[in-house]
Image: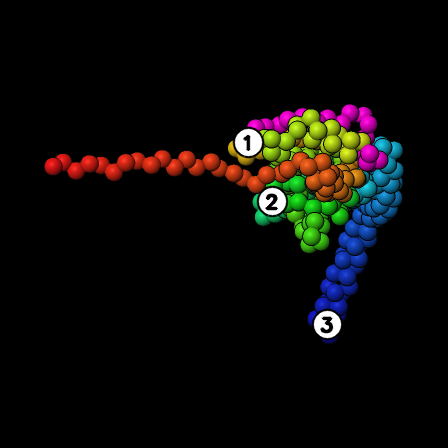
Amino acid sequence: MDEVQARTADMVDAGQAAWVQLSQLAVTYSFSVVGAVLLLLAGYFLAGLISRSIYHGLGRFRGFDETLRKFFSKVARYAVLILVGITVLGQFGVQTASIIAAIGAIGLAIGLALQGTLQNIAAGIMLLALRPFRVGEYIDAGSVAGTIQEIGLFATELKSADGVFVLAPNSQLWNSPVTNYSRNPLRRADITIGIGYDDDIDLALSTMRELAMRDSRVLPDPEVATFVANYGESAIDVTLRYWTKTGDWWQTKLDATKAVKSSFDKQGISIPFPQREVHHINVPPAVEDA
C-alpha cells in the first residue's frame, strides 16, 4: 500500500513539475509568439504596400512595359515576405545564418540547373526595357523573322509572313542583330530596271520620275530621284528612288514595279534579255608537210 502511495506521489510530483515547466515556457514564449504573429501580419501588409507602390511608381515612367511592372512588384513582394519569415524564425532562437546559407546554396543550384532559362529571363528584361521591337512590328533577327505578337519574360511570339507561328527564345533575339522594318515612320524604296543600250536614257528616267510623282503614296520630301546605277553586260541599269510611309512601302513598290514596265512598253523602251556576242573565227586547216 505504501508502495502504491509512493508511486502516486511521484506521478503527482512529476505532473506538477511538467506543469511548472509548461507554464514557464508559455510565459517565456508567449511574447515571442505574439510578436511573431504581429510581425507576420505587419510583414504581409508591408509586402503588399511595397508591391503596389513599385507597380504604380513604375507606371509613371512613360512607355515602361506592363510585364516588367508586374515582375518587379512581385519580386519585391516575395523578397519582403522571405525577410519577414527569417526574422520570425530568429525570434524563436533559430540560427538564421544557416537558413540564409541554405537559401543561397539552393538558389545557386537552381541557377546552375536553369542557366538557359535564367538567360532568357535576363534577355527578356533587357528586351522589355530597351524595346528594340514592340508588338505589331515586323523584324528580322537572323534565322527568325516575323511580326511580333507577344513579348514574354522567357520567349517572344512572332507570326511569319506566311502566317506560321514562331516562338523564339529571348536570349536568341538579344544576342542577334535585329532589323526592325516597322520602327521608323518613313522608308526608302529603290526600283532598278535594265534598259537597252540603244534606248533613250533621259526618257526612261523622266518616265520613272513622273510615274512616281503621280502616286499619292510617294512623299514629295525627300525628293524623288532617278539615276543610272550601272552599265551591265546586256543592259543599262536605271534606278527610281523614292520615300513612302512605312505602312505603304510594300504595296507601293509592287504597284510601281508593275507600272514602270507598262510605261516603258508604251514609250518603246526595251527591257532586254541577257545577251552575249560570240565571234567565230575561221582558222585555215594546217598544211601537212610533204
In the picture, residue 254 is in which quadrant? top right
Identity of the amino acid at label 2?
Ser
Judging from the image, what secondary structure is the residue with disc 3 in?
A: helix
- Please tell me which of labels 1 and 2 falls first in the chain: 2
In x, y percent, where is residue 81?
78, 44
Residue beneath label 3, please?
A: 4
The residue lying furthest to the left in this view is 290
Q: Which residues are magenta?
A: 214-232
The residue that disc 2 covers is 143
The image shows residue 154, relative to residue 178, as above or below, that is below
Q: Which mark is residue 46?
A: none
Q: Secondary structure at mark 1?
A: loop
Residue 218 shown in magenta = yes
User: Image height check: is 161 above or below 176?
Assistant: below
Q: Residue at x 67, y 51 (%)?
A: 166
Of residues 216 and 83, the one drawn nearer to the viewer in this rendering: 216
Q: Viewer-proximal residue, 288 or 106?
A: 288
Asked if the residues shown at circle 2 and circle 3 are in contact, with their CB atoms under 8 angstroms apart, the answer is: no
Q: Position of residue 75 (x, y in %)?
A: 76, 42
